[in-house]
Image (cartoon, grey):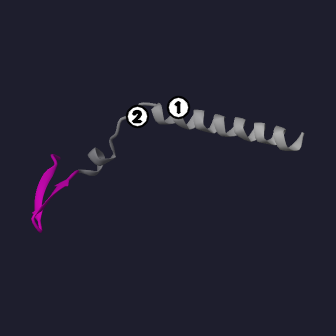
Amino acid sequence: MPSQITKDDHIAHRVVPTQEARQGETTGRMRTVLEVSIGLAVLAGVILWLVYFT
């Protein structure tokens, strides 16, 4: 089903089928950013723990 353009209150709305709206590109960059940031947060926590409790 092709997408449609509708006119409502002088604003153009694009009506997209459900399957087309769900499609997206997965590049893996966000997973890398998440892994690096979690790793840095854990490292910072370990360093703070060592500084204050040892």
Query: Is 22 or 29 nearer to us in this picture?
Result: 29
Rendered view: 4 above or below 53:
below
Please give the residue where the numbered disc 2 appears in the rendered image.
Answer: 26
Find out whether residue 2 is within the magenta segment. Answer: yes
Q: Residue at x 59, y 37 (%)?
A: 37
Residue 13 marker = none
Q: Is residue 39 left or right of residue 16?
A: right
Which quadrant would residue 38 be assigned to in this image?
A: top right
Expressed as whole percent of the image width and height from the top left, the position of residue 54 reads: 90, 39
Label 1 close to label 2 by CB (< 8 Å): no
From this viewpoint, which residue is outermost toward the right?
54
**Image: 10 above or below 22:** below
Q: Give me the residue at 22% from left, 51% from top.
A: 16
Q: Is residue 12 left or right of residue 33?
A: left
- Distance Cα–Cα, label 1 vs label 2: 12 Å
- The amino acid beneath tag 1 is Thr
Magenta region, residue range: 1-16
Relative to 21, is 44 above or below? Answer: above
